[in-house]
Amino acid sequence: MSAGHPSLRELRKAANLTAAAAAKAAKISVNTLSEIERGRVDNGYRNTANPSMKTVVTLLRLYGKDDFANFLVKTPKLLGQARKARGLSRAELADLDVVTGMTTARAIQAFELSTRVPTLEQLADLLEHFDAVRQASHLRGLVAMSTAHGNTKDVRDTAAYKRRQEARQRREANAKMNAPFSVPAQPEAAPLTPVS
């Protein structure tokens, strides 16, 4: 369990489903489900899996967590509203380089219109950017792995995550240096629906 939120594995067990039965019902392989639940081994490190939002929604509904699945389905539209409330265009959000793989206005548009299904990590990064830290934590908790697997490494130790954090810190430092030339403070972000 991560930060008080149950993982997908814990939800599957609570629903009295075997991995094989859950994978079959979700139309994914048992190996894919295992990677989602236990993490993926890359270069000797066990990293958190990064499933698509569609896969997570399917599994949540299968495990009887329709309320959270519905929240995830509505999240792209809610994040679009939050972006507009902050006065950001899609291009400006893409230029912030908040999310790996969403570096163009077209990618942001596809996400907001639900024509592109983001990964769980992309969705969590966007939620964090719009100050929905609790919801992002809950999402990351779904695929949190047990440290009982030996050599584990948190997703926050990956090079891509570190690059995004460094870029975020540089943007903040540049904004402070260029304060007289900066854009006025943005209005309060639109609130997101709380996670139960």
Image (tube, rainbow, N blue to C red):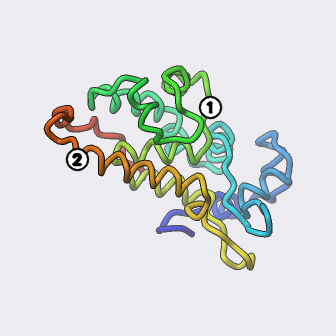
Residue 155 position, x and y percent, is: 60, 60
Name the residue carrying label 2: 177
At label 2, the amino acid type is Met
At label 1, the amino acid type is Val
Residue 83 position, x and y percent, is: 35, 30
Most distant residue in the front direction = 177
Name the residue carrying label 1: 117
Q: Looking at the rendering, which quadrant does residue 27 occupy? A: top right
Is 157 positioned to the left or the right of 98 in the image? Answer: right
Using the image as rendered, state which of residue 7 and residue 116 is in the foreground: 116
Whether residue 17 is situated above or below residue 187 in the rendered picture: below
User: What residue is rendered at 48% in x and 31% in y?
Assistant: 76
SS class, disc 1: loop
Q: Earlier in the sequence, mark 1 or mark 2?
A: 1
Is 170 positioned to the left or the right of 60 in the image? Answer: left
The residue carrying pointer 2 sits among few (fewer than 14), some (14 to 19) or many (20 or more) residues within 10 Å by Cα, namely few
